[in-house]
Amino acid sequence: MNKKLGKHIIQVRNTTLSLLLITYCLLNTTSLTAQSATSSPYSRYGLGDVNTRTSGQSFAMGGTTIAIQNDTLPMFFINSSNPASYSGIRLTTAELGMNYTRLQLQSESSKNIINSAALNYISLAFPIKKWWGASVGLMPFSSVGYKITDHQSIDNIGNVDFLYDGSGGINQLYFGNGIKPFYNLPRMYLKSEKYKKLASKTNADNTAKSDADYRADQLKIKKELKHKKEMQQLSLGFNASYLFGHIDHTRRSIFPASSGNYNTRTGIATRISDVYFDYGVQYAHTIDSVKKRELKEKVKLLFGATFSAQTKLNAKTDSLSYNYYDVQGYERVRDTIENAKGVNGTITLPLTFGIGIGFKKGDRWMVAADFAMQNWSSYQAFNQSGDLKNSMRVSLGAQWVPNSKAAQKKYLSRVHYRFGGRYAQTSLELKSTQLTEKAASIGFGFPVGRNYLLQSFSMINIGLEAGQRGTVNNGLIKENFYKVTIGFTLNDRWFVKPKFD
């Protein structure tokens, strides 16, 4: 065996081993929850903080995902937010992401800082055909985590403490497919009788075509091929997700011992287990010339849309309420008010819709923008309204690569530089104030160990985001957050037999 080729084979085997390890963790580790840790008091409402399904790449671009798709050349990234993007995957791709959050909670009178870190997502995508790709992954759908103390002075009773705390969340295990339904149209046209008649220099009666007729036929062929190649760029996709997890909410009322009242505790545990679908479409229009002058770098206009219908999820609740008194820090139950287990019901998820546009110049510049909305006013849990409002999000992001094919000595020219921003009106309206959220982000993609011969590529993605949600007005809480995401992307070609001399 050629020594140089043997060395490459060892490298690809090591990379493949890493991909297999990630796949094994994804498919066989049932204890992995993939929930992003949260410590927000606003996660008390609805299903908690709902995940925006961003990867290491899109996180640093303001969360723009809807129009972003892979080209035919690596690096390839997994965009689970729009499953139509899977059709562009050409190499087996694995991604793993982790995040760290520093959250500052600020009221009119105090501040509190909370740090948290968690595994954010793990996903795998692979090509099936040139026009068909698939992906499987695990990530958080929503997260709950809060502890709130409300001190009140009540006449004839005294100081009463109301304690609220919650934990848990919903996980999302998805399997998605993306196809290009018209991928073979140009090839089918070139094999058609219509093409053969137009391409022939003779008519049906074997008489020679005039030069004008022949040129007219060639022009028709050119237009037909161009039209079918444009249709070839349409992609459709879907994700079938299994949503599972539990959310725990606890409320305590603690009275002063002198009041003669017993403390009360109410706990509600909700378990969710059901299937959820979302859909996507993408289209790319290529501009390779302007006024018959060829461009050095092709320009692509990107379009995308995502949709998920209003869905009812099966759920169960366990609720327990009782009076108790405190004995040296321990709860001694006096009597049980309610004890209900395994109550069946449904949770209504809202209709979601999003559109995105993008602009891509060669493999150097990419700019994208998203607009998305969710009909949270239709949210219900066990036939009870969540008192939520419809939400909307706008995001803008860009990526710049000076020279993706630069030599090893010019490493900084191969780095992906990313930045973006986002603004959202959340689904929460408290004390007649609908909360807003805004953030700015920056990030870098550091290529590692590229190998064009064996089609093996890796990248470390680092993103930083700073933003805020809420306000200190009307007795509310403002959240100032700082997030850091570290993601690992691996591209490799599987099922290639090694060659010998």
Image (spheres, helix red, strand yellow):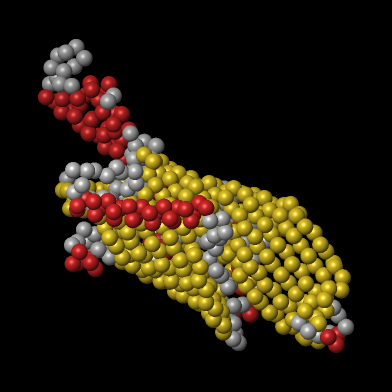
Q: Is residue 255 left or right of residue 459?
A: right
Q: Position of residue 81 (x, y in %)?
A: 46, 54
Q: Position of residue 112 (x, y in %)?
A: 57, 83
Q: Quadrant of residue 111?
A: bottom right
Q: Is residue 409 left or right of residue 38?
A: left
Which is more toward the observer, 21 or 139? 21
Q: Position of residue 289 (x, y in %)?
A: 20, 47
Q: Position of residue 462 (x, y in %)?
A: 38, 68
Q: Is residue 306 left or right of residue 318?
A: left
Which is more toward the observer, 396 or 91? 91
Residue under the image location 34 percent in, 43 percent down: 495
Q: Quadrant of residue 48?
A: bottom right
Residue under the image location 34 percent in, 40 percent down: 130
Which residue is the extreme one toward the top?
Answer: 205
Residue 181 visible in the current orientation: yes
Q: Vertical placement of 106 versus 303: above or below?
A: below
Question: How many labels were placed on the picture?
Answer: 0
Which quadrant: the C terminus? Answer: top left
Q: Quadrant of residue 272?
A: bottom right
Residue under the image location 46 percent in, 68 percent down: 99
Residue under the image location 56 percent in, 70 percent down: 38
Q: Is residue 410 left or right of residue 473?
A: left
Residue 418 visible in the current orientation: no
Q: Vertical placement of 144 versus 371: above or below?
A: below
Which residue is the extreme one toward the left?
Answer: 211
Which is more toward the observer, 292 or 91? 91
